[in-house]
Amino acid sequence: MSTSDSGNDIALTRPQKPGRLAALRSALDEGAVRSAERMINTLHPAEIAQLLESLPPRRRELVWEMTDPEHDGDILVELSEDVRSQLIREMEPEELAAAAGNLEVDDLADLLADLPEKVTQQLLRHMDQQDRERLSRVLSWPQDCAGGLMSTDTVSVRADVSLEVVQRYLRMRGELPERTDRLFVVDRGDRFLGTLTLARLLTGDPEEPVGACLDPEATRIAPDLPASEVSQLFRDRDLLSAPVVDEQGVLLGRITVDDVVDVIAEEAAHEVMAGAGLRDEEDVFAPVLPATRRRLLWLAINLVTASVGGLVVQRFEATIGKVAALAVLMPIVSSMGGIAGTQTVTLIIRGLALGQVQWRDARWLLLREVGISALTGTAMALILGGITIAWLGTWSIAPIIGAAMLVNLLAAAIVGVTVPLLLRRLSIDPALSAGVILTMFTDCIGFATLLGLGTLFLV
């Protein structure tokens, strides 16, 4: 039997209650430092991290000084990248070394990249050979794949021993790693053979060998599997934990459901933030200049795409001068196209994220969305045509606005399907770019169709 203990002390906790945060802020406002300090140090490190992210910089520094140094490392691991970097810059090397030295190997791997080189070298010098090897194993994989997610905190047993021997071994150890629902069965070369559930271990015949009780078909994960696919695997198979096994079949570590919950939360945050051109973990209280630099590029891209739409309108300046009603109707056409396209883009991006949509599905999805847009576009064209007749008192513009609406919704469907799939095929994040491209197309096509038809039939 062999064991590898570099446990992860992360717990799933309830979100920070607004009342608790308000009470703490009130204590800080009133200068009740001791009361605030007591309140802070009764919280879980994850809750303290959430609290720190919810405070402006000056309050954040004050609360950080009140935290128990023993928990500093656990809190730093839970913080977003921006807030963590800010606090690390303000800490002395000795403080950082003490905070990081209290961490388990897997948590230290998450923090190591943000530490100064001097502190990193000091930590490595004080680690034993086994922990250095574990750390090296975790750091050898990118954070966004199974190898980067895995914990080396595993308990492995041999297939040729009895269940009673395993039970005695576990009693001798005295504890199991967090969220252990199964043991991993390996041979003498640490090659993975299968899993032994704790339920089978406790209810099986004590004399029965482990080899007769193991599940050889248990899910195993390759270390280079992307984190998004790992989370999908856990969702599909309702897993609590799974072994990470390399190409040679050697057991490297395990992934537990708490790691996957973090991945799912990060993916959800990415979809929301990327759609607005923001970083996933951007600090809401970040200084003005850094935040401005991050947003300028996105705004500049939007300015360029908006200018393209403006150039299209400029080409029909004479038409707008003669038929001013078209200028009133232009925002309606572009807005409806944008909304319809956003619905399609959101559906496709969600399908891509969940692994439901592939490039081979493009033709079927395109026909489906075009069909939907043809029906909704016809309905909206008829409604808008009727509104135009009632509003402007003339029927001559109604067919034009109706046709422009239909054409723009069809274009939105085509762009909404093809652009996310093309971007994914080019290894570009569609959540970050698809919205800008969609807006440019729907604005330009909507304006060009409306003003072009107006030029042909009204001028």
Image (cartoon, helix red, strand yellow):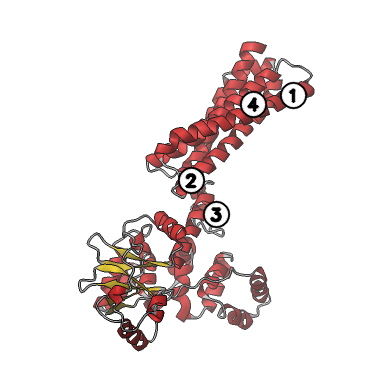
Say which residue label 4 marks: 378
Q: Secondary structure at mark 3?
A: helix
Q: Is 30 on the left-hand or right-hand side of 452? A: right
Nearer the observer: mark 1 or 3; the answer is 1
> How far apart in space, not on screen, are marks 2 and 1 (Cα)?
37 Å
Crowdedness near tag 4: few (<14), some (14–19) or many (≥20) residues, C-alpha within 10 Å = some
How far across and down, in percent of the image, does residue 182 sit? 38, 73
The amino acid marked with disc number 1 is: Gly
> How far apart in space, not on screen, are marks 1 and 3 (Cα)?
49 Å
Q: Is residue 103 visible?
A: no
How far across and down, in percent of the image, does residue 416 sit? 51, 36
> How far apart in space, not on screen, are marks 1 and 4 (Cα)?
12 Å
Work out whether mark 3 precedes mark 2 in sequence or the reverse, and give the earlier one. Answer: 3
Crowdedness near tag 1: few (<14), some (14–19) or many (≥20) residues, C-alpha within 10 Å = some
Q: Secondary structure at mark 1?
A: helix
Q: Secondary structure at mark 4?
A: helix
The amino acid marked with disc number 2 is: Gly
Q: Looking at the image, is 429 positioned above or below residue 21?
A: above
Q: Residue at x 38, y 63 (%)?
A: 149
Say which residue label 1 marks: 386
Nearer the observer: mark 1 or 4; the answer is 4
Work out whether mark 2 precedes mark 1 in sequence or the reverse, and give the earlier one. Answer: 2
Work out whether mark 4 precedes mark 2 in sequence or the reverse, and give the earlier one. Answer: 2
Say which residue label 3 marks: 288
Q: Is 286 on the left-hand or right-hand side of 212? A: right
Say which residue label 2 marks: 351
Work out whether mark 4 precedes mark 3 in sequence or the reverse, and give the earlier one. Answer: 3
